[in-house]
Image: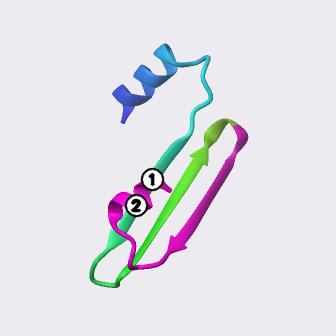
Amino acid sequence: EVEFLEYVNDGYEQYLRVFTDGSKDLGLGSSGFAFVVPSYGYSESYRTQGLLSVYTVEML
């Protein structure tokens, strides 16, 4: 984690950082995605239809 943060802070300080993730739980049949913009203290997360593939969820 520390190495990653140093890399991002040193090489990309002029860019707006947006972190995203999507996942699917096959056991529960649910999926969702989220994104975070740390410099604005902003984040959102959503549940999606369980019928969506994990690839589709990642693209949302």
Kindly identify the residue that appears in the image at 63 percent across and 59 percent down: 44
Q: Against 46, is 49 above or below? A: below
How many marks can you see? 2
Residue 50: which quarter of the image? bottom left
Residue 4 lies, in percent from the top left, at: 38, 29
Q: Which residue is mark 1?
A: 59
Q: Is residue 51 left or right of residue 41?
A: left
Residue 22: which quarter of the image? bottom left
Mark 2 surroundings: few (<14), some (14-19) or many (≥20) residues within 10 A: few
Give whichever of 57, 36 is nearer the camera: 57
Kindly identify the residue that appears in the image at 51 percent across and 21 percent down: 9
Q: Which residue is mark 2?
A: 56
Q: Is residue 12 left or right of residue 50?
A: right
| Contact check, label 1 and label 2, Cβ < 8 Å | yes
Q: Amino acid at mark 1?
A: Met
Q: Against 11, is 54 above or below? A: below
Magenta-colored stretch includes residue 46: yes
Magenta-colored stretch includes residue 26: no
Q: How is the image coloured?
A: rainbow
Kindly identify the residue that appears in the image at 35 percent across and 83 percent down: 29
| Span of residues in magenta | 40-60
Q: Mark 1: which secondary structure?
A: helix
Q: CA distance from mark 1 to mark 2?
A: 5 Å
Q: Which mark is residue 49?
A: none
Residue 46 lies, in percent from the top left, at: 57, 68
